[in-house]
Image (cartoon, grey):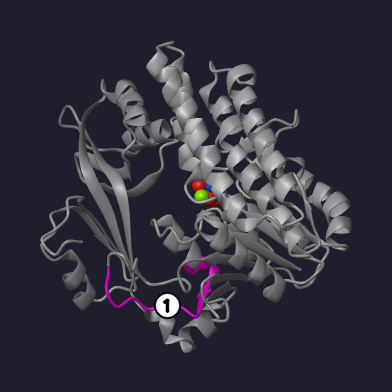
Amino acid sequence: MRIFKFGGASVKDADAVINVAKIIKEYGTTTNTLVIVSAMGKTTNALETLLEKFLDKENETTAAVHNYLNTLDNLKNYHLEIIKNLFSEQKTQRNLAFTTLDYLFLQLQDTLENKINIQNYDEAYDQIISFGEVISTHIISLYLNEENINNEWIDAKNFIKTDNTWREGKVDLVWTENLVLRELVPVLAQKIVITQGFLGGTLGNKTTTLGREGSDFSAAIFAYCLNSQFVDVSVTIWKDVPGILNADPKIIKNTQMYDTLSYREAAEMTFYGANVIHPKTIKPLENRQIPLYVKSFLNPENAGTCIKNIDAQTANNQDISNKIPTIIFKPNQALVSFAVKDLTFITEENLGLILNAFTQFNIKINLMQSTAVSFSVCTENNARKLSKLNDLLANEFEIKVQENLKLVTILHHNAEIIHEIMEEKTIFLKQETPQTYSAVVLEAPNPKGE
Ligand code: ASP
Ligand code: MG
């Protein structure tokens, strides 16, 4: 049972979609292959803009209305261009592709103008943003038909069941597994199935999204559920990089690729901000010991990286690649420090108060450090959440926020690499264990142009 996930970059134009069809033909099987696709190119961002512009239009100025309709047109034209290039005049699915696109854009406009409740922004967000994946999967399914790749389009919201935590739907795995086994397995037995990443549905069948870049997570959930039926489930994430590298090649020269990684190491890398795979992806796969391949859609014949179970013993003997230093930058961070107001010390009670507030506002701690009189936390710089935190705790503590920071994490560090990476950086907070070196530094580019 193969589960393939194609992200936005792999379906960003007609040539990319043609390449996806080739990969499915060559590396998939005619049955028991599930294909999960993201929105095309930067469509998700464009839909976010569209929603903003629609809300602006409520001011009812002509310019705002014009702006909104323009954004809608541009997004439609982007998809239209892809369809024109995929389906030439002679193609049998050409008309159907055009009508499907017309219909989906009318539906998008109708949802915006008549169906969403703008009092609940997050709920409205999910109803609109989800169109990206719905549109891309329809186009790709039609193109696969054109190429005689027998496939069925399914609606992910009928399978991935979530609560109504809009924009971050919490998946009900038991319910989802039941539906997948009962209703998806029989379809998979007959043809390739194509569905949307990133989307789920509530009990009332409203669409939810699983968090930005969540399509990898969708692939992992489907794999988890299918694993009780098949012995050989694997997930392949097709990307524009050869596999998982030890650093972002846009930032660091001479990167190295891992042939294999343990679930644990991969999970740690995503925690610290490596954005090759979505952080939630690893856990369901590890739970059922399902291998995850990260491969290049440009060079599909290359092996890429395999994430799987590697026990500590093997990891030690094996693979020196496990000792390659991994360098991860997490941008857009803030350092929040809490100092006690009188000369009492930071106590467990104080810490409890602070940490509870972080839990309450769902603020993720990326690094923390405590001294006698202060406690510092590196977290995502989210002004809205940090101001709530400040309102709640300002009476108890002197709170300072330092912005414009990034978190640097080096796994399997050595003195040389630390020197190379940290040279000329202003360090605000630093922590070192035998495995992990972390530092919070100014975001501003350094003279080397990083
Ligand atoms: N299209 C969604 C996003 O860009 C989900 C994904 O690409 O994984 O966030
Ligand atoms: Mg995307």
47 versus 18 height, above or below? above
Spot occupied by residue 65 in the image (x, y as percentages of width and height): 45, 18
Foreground residue, 396 or 53? 53
Foreground residue, 432 or 232? 232
Decide if residue 50 is on the left or right side of residue 109. left
Quadrant of the rendered image containing residue 339: top left
Residue 282 visible from this viewpoint: no
Which quadrant is the N terminus positioned in? bottom right
77 versus 281 height, above or below? above
Decide if residue 41 is on the left or right side of residue 35. left
**Residue 106 within the magenta-colored segment of the rendering:** no
Foreground residue, 41 or 84? 84
Spot occupied by residue 380 in the image (x, y as percentages of width and height): 34, 42
What residue is drawn where x is 37% and y is 45%?
Answer: 365
What residue is drawn where x is 29% and y is 73%?
Answer: 413
**Disc 1 beta carbon < 8 A from ligand 1?**
no
Near mark 1 (Cα within 10 A), the count class, few <14, some 14-19 or many ≥20, is: some
Foreground residue, 52 or 228? 52
Helix, strand or loop under label 1: loop
What residue is drawn where x is 34% and y is 66%?
Answer: 248
Spot occupied by residue 178 in the image (x, y as percentages of width and height): 83, 48
The residue where tag 1 is placed is 257
Dot 1 amino acid type: Met
Residue numbers of the magenta segment:
252-265
What residue is drawn where x is 17% and y is 64%?
Answer: 422
249 versus 129 height, above or below? below
Which residue is most to the top? 60
Residue 70 visible from this viewpoint: yes
Which quadrant is the C terminus positioned in? bottom left
